[in-house]
Image: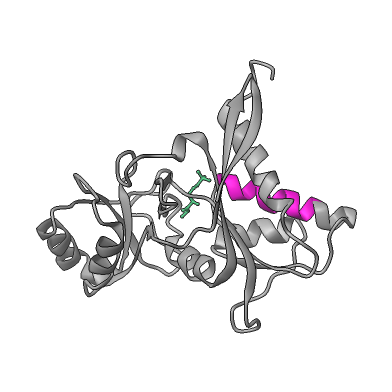
Amino acid sequence: MSPEQDPVKLMKQQVGKAAADRVKSGSIVGLGTGSTTAYTIQFLGERLKSGEIKDIKGVPTSFQASVLAKEYGIPLTTLDEIDHIDIAIDGADEVDPHKNLIKGGGAAHTREKIVDCLADQFIVVVDGSKIVDRLGSTFLLPVEVMPMAMTPVMAAITKLGGKPTLRMGVKKAGPVITDQGNMVIDVKFDAIDNPAELEKTLNNIPGVLENGLFVGVADVILVGEIKDGQPVVREIS
Ligand SMILES: O=C(CO)[C@H](O)[C@H](O)COP(=O)(O)O
């Protein structure tokens, strides 16, 4: 590996490709959102173009995934046109030892949860930095909120012990707006001891559309790591 190569990029590339290699001809594939799954979409498109696989259809989890899939020549479908998803491949912001996840760094967790939960097999692709002992230790928990309910939702989350912050755009002035036209708050919890319970509790607050806890959904985690200077993929299943 030459020094000018970014190790995180290399890990993401390797793991994104490893997941794309698992897709078989004829599959309906959930296409995740983010910089890691961007490589999966790219490699899937290349496999299709070379004729190595054929007849796949993608179900995008975001506008970003849809644009990328079109760019790489992957035919798309919608949930109205299919009765199952064979495999979904998506990234994550944190993965705990029970394969539970925090997602939503790209504000796409609502559509991602719909697609990933429907898949017969859900493969998560991450670089090694995403593996944690406990959810919430490195990443704030994203919650998608309807704008008119922002104040009461923030108050309810504060009452639960969370510290919510409205997510602001990086290049855009003002808040991040999701593909559904909502806003995202990022919540710091001192400890997420029971992710399954917190996932339900948050979604029960009127005005919350979905939160980024994915509990008991992932089947396989593919982790990109650097060993002896080379990118390798470790599987947790
Ligand atoms: O949940 C997500 C988007 O909502 C992404 O999958 C997550 O943020 C990981 O992104 P990346 O692969 O760029 O690290």
Image position, residue 10 (x, y; %) = 63, 32
Q: How many marks?
A: 0
Query: Is residue 69 shown in magenta?
Result: no
| Quadrant of residue 123 within the rendered picture | bottom right
Image position, residue 30 (x, y; %) = 61, 65
Q: Residue furthest front?
A: 237
| Quadrant of residue 65 within the rendered picture | bottom right
Image position, residue 163 (x, y; %) = 18, 49
Image position, residue 40 (x, y; %) = 67, 50
Query: Is residue 45 shown in magenta?
Result: yes
Q: Nearer the viewer, residue 168 or 232?
A: 232
Would you say 26 lies left or right of 62 here? right
Would you say 89 lies left or right of 128 here? right
Please tell me whether residue 42 is drawn above or below residue 211 in the rendered image.
Answer: above
Q: Nearer the viewer, residue 192 or 209?
A: 192
Q: Which quadrant, please, contains the N terminus?
A: top right
Span of residues in magenta? 35-46
What residue appears at the point 30 percent right and 62 percent down from the top-left corner? 196
Please tell me whether residue 165 is drawn above or below residue 8 in the rendered image.
Answer: below
What residue appears at the point 80 percent right and 65 percent down from the top-left corner? 25
What residue appears at the point 43 percent right and 44 percent down from the top-left corner? 171
Please tell me whether residue 116 is drawn above or below residue 165 in the rendered image.
Answer: below
Q: Residue furthest left?
A: 159
- For the stretch drawn in magenta, the main secondary structure is helix
| Quadrant of residue 146 within the rendered picture | bottom left
Please tell me whether residue 101 is drawn above or below residue 210 in the rendered image.
Answer: above
Would you say 98 lies left or right of 9 here? left
